[in-house]
Image (cartoon, helix red, strand yellow):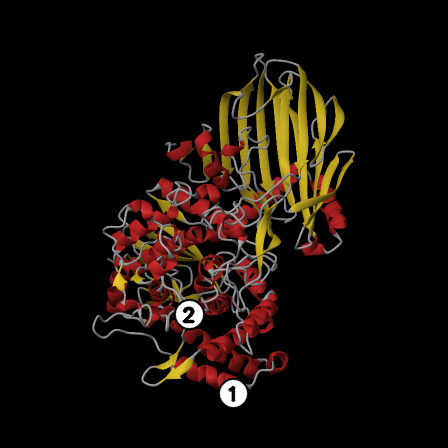
Amino acid sequence: MNEIKNDLLIDEWKIVEKNFNLEGSKKNETIFSIGNGYIGMRGNFEEGLKDKKYTVEGTYLNGFYETHEIKYGEKAYAFPEIGQTMLNVINSKIIKIYVDDEEFNMMDSEILDYERVLDLKEGVLKRKAVWRTKTGKELELNFERLASFDDKHLAAVKVSIIPLNFSGKIKLVSLIDGNVKNLTAEDDPRVGSGLSGRSLEIIEKNIEDDEISILSKTKNSNFKLLCAAKNLFTTEQDYTVKSIEDEYIVGIEYEINGVEKKKIEFIKYISYTTTRDYDDEIFNVKDRVLKRAVKMGYENIKKNQIEYMKRFWESADVEIEGDAKLQQGIRFNMFHILQSTGKDSKTNIGAKGLTGEGYEGHYFWDTEMYIIPMFIYTKPEVARKLLEYRYNTLDKARERARQMSHEKGALFPWRTINGEECSAYFPASTAQYHINADIAYAIKKYYEATLDEEFLIKYGAEILFETARIFEDLGHYVEGKGFCIDGVTGPDEYTAIVNNNAYTNLMAKDHLSLAAYVAEYIKKNFNDEYQRIKEKIELDEEEIVRWKKAADNMYIPYDEKLKIHPQDDSFLSKKIWDFENTPKENYPLLLHYHPLVIYRHQVCKQADWVLALYLHSDKFTKEQKIRDFEYYEKVTTHDSSLSPCIFSIVACDIGYIDKAYDYFMRTARMDLDDHHGNTKDGIHAANMAGSWLGIVAGFGGFRAFEDEILFSPRIPQNWNRYSFKINYRQRLIKVDVNKEKVILQLIKGSPIKVKLYDKEVQLEDKIERDLAN
């Protein structure tokens, strides 16, 4: 192993810290976070840190939020009135250890040996510390923590204590702390929220035998949260028990008669249940969760966790030979995406996952464009659940459409938790109508890869029809151009409220065409279901005709002089930003310049039209892609972490492999190496999924269009070999690339035709081809 920044070591399947670095503790709390898509626990130490300036204590429940009034200096019609913030909830993981009234703490205790490990194969966080007290007593302490993938309401902590050179009293205190708050936003809206003070009011605290619990309630959103913990010793112990309770804390103190060299093992089973999931059944659910956990035992829960991770890696693992840091980075990223993503159709994934409070835990278009593609081809059942979440918030999207003066249809929110728009800055949020087309695109790709007709009929078609209505209503015909869409913002948040954003128009064209196709397909093959949907949403078949017409006549801006696609009607007429004289410390621009200053220039925060070149790569020649790429590369700051991975993919597509590699390396270890200096605030979830896309769609050249899948692999000079797997229509295909060969192997499923470097081949077992130059 070799050391890297902040004392993290290189290991292909683990994140390892050998020396505790106090200055880097907040960043590493993010990195060592564990979760299961519902519960997320930052990598705080069980005992906490004495000086709170070095820690962000955080536990989060996906989709559990508080509301607050959005305050405007000047408010206009249809501005969102209520904001939503994912709450930092009751801290249940606290376990304190004392010897001779001396408290173990990583800040000021004498530590003889230390190691912290996030095991990516097991889905378990582990820590070992050998502690010498001021009186010379030595103890080996081992902690394990997991959030169960089998039961979203369950987490568990195991602690073992071995007195190495003494026998005597050891005190262990297990607590639940309700004195929790969210971070405030201050001057950076990406970091915190508008909430202040405690958002959770404690209703009751309870201690009964070895179980402790706190029932709390949000002030505004009226959700109840029950946090409970069952405390058990799994080794025979001689101890006394004392209850602990104050205004915010409930717990149990165990005074143990420790025996030299004899292990003490303690398990804390933790349950979180809320009325957002179960109305008033939370106590019954809590009882079931904890009783099942005790019956199974920690080792069996851990065994199931390992089995879950094994199944995931068997279908999703990416291997890279020749760069151990990159191998670690890509697996770390995939692991964090897996443990941050909701899997219950009620929740989604926030921009910071479940590792921090940045962007208030809101869900964005990041899900459809970055996260869902990874799951479609690795774990498609999760992709379906994420799309079902959109269906379950469709009524809220209908309400938003009416607020935005659309008589029919549904407009999905830019930022949300419960389905309602909660972004106060409309030029860079509500104006991004492409969110509808992004969701439609994800539905299309999911269906192409799974042929899941049940999903399409039950959920997908209704979403497609309702969202297509918005584009038909939004656009209008302009003589000499065609169907135009005015007053929108594309993915690039440095260019707002423009006419004919090229990305939006191209995505809307695809969306309208898809909606018309699906309507005809379901009518022909499942007419009863078609009639049900038609009646439910009062669909007029003339609308379908208009969708097709709008798609066929969609205006896509093109500049004949430069032979490129302008980002919008006005983009090329603006002054190019003075990049040469902009100090490095003035990036990201949004923190140093008024939006209007930015909007007046040719400058892109992130991939916009370049993203379209990837998503619809079959629609453009290589020469066109090169011209567009080279133009936009010069004016893009990549202030958004979503951007470099897309530029990397398109660079691969046009043969700029070295440049693609440079962009890719900015994504693969962004959080592990803290490239943006803000990993302490939480992971960059979309970027993490983007690093998977960079390998699979970038260097692997993987594309899926309708009934066709294609591979055009390249290999960076720095690598000796890489491989990835694709789940497609009940097949599992492994793509293995080295310096000389490409090997396609059908691991599971029936034979299938694929394209390799534009040549169709029948994949029945294994195919080898020379690597293209």
Amino acid at pointer 2: Val
Q: Residue 81: name its quadrant.
A: bottom right
Q: Find disc 1 in the rendering and name its residue.
A: 542
Q: Residue furthest bottom?
A: 542
From the viewer's perspective, is 693 left or right of 392?
left
Q: Locate residue 23, reporting x and y percent.
A: 44, 31
Which residue in the rendered view is the most extreme toward the top? 135
Residue farthest along the left direction in this orientation:
561
| Label 1 or label 2, whichever comes before in sequence order | 2
Few, some or many C-alpha atoms within 10 Å of disc 1 (few <14, some 14-19, many ≥20)? few
Residue located 66% across and 54% down the image: 220
SS for tag 2?
loop
SS class, disc 1: helix
| Residue 412 visible (yes or no) | yes
Q: Is residue 273 above or below residue 269?
A: below
Q: Nearer the viewer, residue 161 or 476?
A: 476
Residue 511 at x, y = what percent? 45, 74
Q: Nearer the viewer, residue 52 or 544?
A: 52
Residue at image coords 67%, 26% = 172
**The residue under label 1 is which amino acid type?**
Glu
Q: Residues within 10 Å of mark 2 (few under 14, many from 20)?
A: many
**Residue 512 or residue 310, whichever sits in front:** 512
What is the quadrant of the C terminus in the image?
Answer: bottom left
**Residue 398: image x %, image y %?**
58, 72
Which one is closest to the eye, mark 1 or mark 2? 2
Q: Residue furthest right?
A: 208
Expressed as whole percent of the image width and height from the top left, the position of residue 542 reads 52, 87
Number of on-image labels:
2
On the question of residue 701 being in view, the answer is no
Mark 2 lies on residue? 488
Q: Quadrant of the N terminus?
A: top left
For residue 604, which quarter of the picture? bottom left
